[in-house]
Image (cartoon, helix red, strand yellow):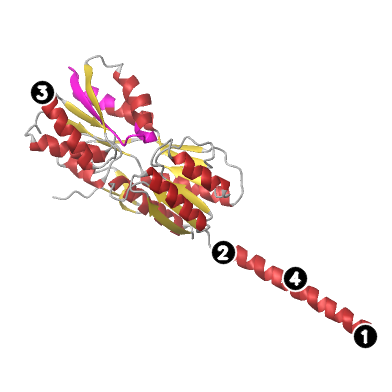
Amino acid sequence: MKSKMGLLGVLMVCSLLLTSFAMDAGAQGKKIVIGSSMVQKDSDWWAMMAKLAEQAARAKGYDIVTVWANADQEKQIKDVEDLIQRKVDIMIVGPVQQDGSMVAIDQAFKAGIPVVTVGRLSKTKNVAAAVVADEPEFGRKQIQQIAKDYPNGANIVFLFGPMGAGYAIQMFDDGTTPELKKYPNLKLLHKYTSPSDIASDGMKNAEDAIVRFNNIDVFACSNDGLALGAVRAVQSAGKGDKIKVYGAGATLMGMQAVYDGQMRYTTIKSQAKMAEMALGFIETILNKKPLTTKLALVPPVVVTKDNVATVKDPMLGGSFTEPSTFTPKK
């Protein structure tokens, strides 16, 4: 009897161990799911950011779920709550606002889900890592190009936006403003603030500026979305030969406008580079390894008529390893 009881006990222990091993194997075989909260689907720049982040994630064997905030901070907070409920393993977040995004990211942190921000900074200390453009340098480069193009001086209207977006604030406050002080013959007539970075907002403010000021030489813009709106306003007013438009954060439409001579300048803010760096952070975090840095900066690549057809980036086509040049529409 004792022999039978002993054998039964051994069998039960073996059964429990096998079950435990099976559970561990299942956990190890679980596919990592990345939750991605992006700013605005009808923004060319953010649409490309999401696309390349998805490509980079899937190339690493991860699943990725993308949700869109529609440039609404309250919606982004709800979207992040939804991703928490879905029990994603880690998040990529493009903050709508640097202040307002704190609520969403702090909620993920409390739920034990690390967050890597891309494109914009958040003011919360609970971000695991951040990948952003070197925004002050984008501002400096833009002003330097204007100074080069207008050695005798120029009157500038600045189209700023989106309101509250960290990248736009850093570009203007830490790059544009101090760089302007180096060129006394460049005069800032007015700074307009837009709620978003889409062309309709840029067009509305540019139209107002053209009516308000009769001596504009330049529209300088936080991004290509607003710049493309300024292009429409300038063309509609018949001032294409008098007012030049300077964008930033190149989109395909912005590149086309530079090629066509409608925009003087833009800068590539490489979403591919950001996606690559973000996935590097994610792999390190998931493997529970220490981060050597929590901030990665992507430098600007200046684009003018001179190099618009030769500069290479995956946003223009090709792949991460073999990027293409821009193919203009004739």
For residue 305, say whether it is visible: no
Amino acid on which disc 3 is placed: Asn
Dot 4 falls on a residue whose secondary structure is helix
The image's mark for residue 30 is 2
Mark 1 and mark 2 residues within 8 Å of each other at the beta carbon:
no
**Disc 3, SS:** loop
Percent x, y of residue 24: 66, 65
Residue drawn at (36%, 43%), measured in percent from left and top? 270
* Mark 3 crowdedness (10 Å alpha carbons): few <14, some 14-19, many ≥20: few
Give the camera-side residue of 309 and 84: 84
Residue 300 appearing in the image: yes
Q: Whole-Å distance between the Cαs marked 1 and 4?
A: 25 Å
Residue 285, placed above or below residue 209:
below
Q: Which amino acid does label 1 sit on?
A: Met
Residue sticking out furthest to the right: 2
Mark-to-mark CA distance, 3 and 2 = 63 Å
Please report the residue visible at 25 percent of the width from the left and 35 percent of the height from the top: 247
Could you say where residue 29 lies in the image, as x and y percent from the top left? 58, 65
Cα distance between the residues tagged 4 and 2: 20 Å
Give the residue pinned by disc 1: 1
Residue 58 drawn at (x, y percent): 44, 59
Which is more N-terminal, label 2 or label 4? 4
What residue is drawn where x is 48% and y is 41%?
103
Residue 152 magenta-highlighted: yes
Q: Is mark 2 on a helix, strand or loop?
A: loop
Q: Name the residue under label 3.
A: 214
| Kind of residue indicated by mark 2 | Lys
Examine the image and state in which quarter residue 194 appears: top left
